Amino acid sequence: MELPKECIADILGRTTPLDVARNSIVSKIFCSAADSDSIWNNFLPSDFHSIISQSPFLANAPKKTIYLALSDHPIIIDQGKKSFQLDRKTGKKCYMLAARALQISMGDDERYCGWVTLPESRFEEVAKLEVAKHEVGFWYDIYGMINTVDLSPNTQYAAFLVFKMITDNGGPIRALLSIDIFGVPIRKNAVCLDMKLKLISECPNVRSDGLLEIEMGEFFNSGLEDGEVEMRAMISKFLFWEGSFYLEGIEVRPKL
């Protein structure tokens, strides 16, 4: 005797999105139950209505469609200053703060910072930092902040500096990366942003969108406290670096 579809949907709703996908191939009734709004409503964040209100095409879509849309592609929110996405396997929240949402030292001075379009970027514009024009010892201070209430509770998160670098010749760019939560330093680390250097333990990784990223630090969000996560990158050229440095933003996503 088969369980009613509603019972199967209730059971699947207590698992994970990945488990639902795996069980949907068990039988036709499991496949049918796996499309139930009651299941996917459990996996969507409680504030998803306000998030998708900025993407009207999702407003009346089935919950599974909304979940898959939010996990397949980031949506742009907050007047283009942030993007939001769900981790497909877990349903945890991911945010990226665009360069326009960050505080950049001398970011309003066109001698030091320009705003341009980049084909790989999800945002309308990125910051082009004129690193090569400065002497060794000149630092760009980049600062961003996100509230813990905006993130998924009981989740280990990591912050990543996302950028693109076109090097013509010369030495690398170095950076000091730090992350604080509730005013308590979690990590402060000196890194090199040149992938060609093999003498250091940490170097950037290539993302699926073609940009580069390097981890700034990680933290656990219990969801019990309302506080700010502060992320800072101080960037400087080293030796005679020549090229272009494009800042996409800072991404905060689950550390899986």
Image (cartoon, grey):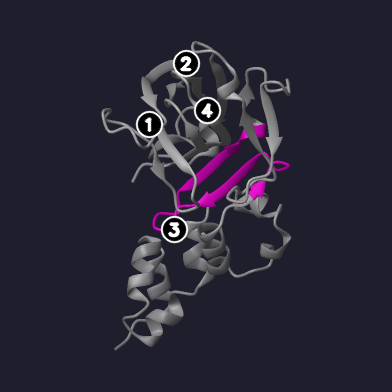
Disc 2/disc 1 C-alpha distance (Å): 14 Å
Q: Quadrant of the N terminus?
A: bottom left
Disc 2/disc 4 C-alpha distance (Å): 36 Å
- Sort mark 2 into few (<14), some (14-19) or many (20+) by Cα contacts within 10 Å: few
Disc 3/disc 4 C-alpha distance (Å): 39 Å
In the structure shown, which secondary structural element does the residue marked by tag 2 occupy?
A: loop
Q: Are marks 3 and 2 in contact (CB under 8 Å)?
A: no
Give the number of the disc on residue 252: none
Give the number of the disc on residue 218: 1
Inspect the image, locate mark 2, and give the three-letter code of the amino acid beneath it: Gly
Disc 3/disc 2 C-alpha distance (Å): 31 Å
Disc 1/disc 4 C-alpha distance (Å): 31 Å
In the structure shown, which secondary structural element does the residue marked by tag 1 occupy?
A: strand
Residue 195 position by quadrant: top left
Q: Earlier in the sequence, mark 2 or mark 1?
A: 2
Q: Is residue 22 visible?
A: yes
Residue under label 4, please give it.
Answer: 242
Question: Which span is picked out in magenta?
Answer: 76-100
Residue under label 2, please give it.
Answer: 183
In the structure shown, which secondary structural element does the residue marked by tag 3 occupy?
A: loop
Residue drawn at the location 38% of the way across and 70% of the way down: 21
Residue under label 3, please give it.
Answer: 88
Magenta residue check for 79: yes
Magenta residue check for 77: yes
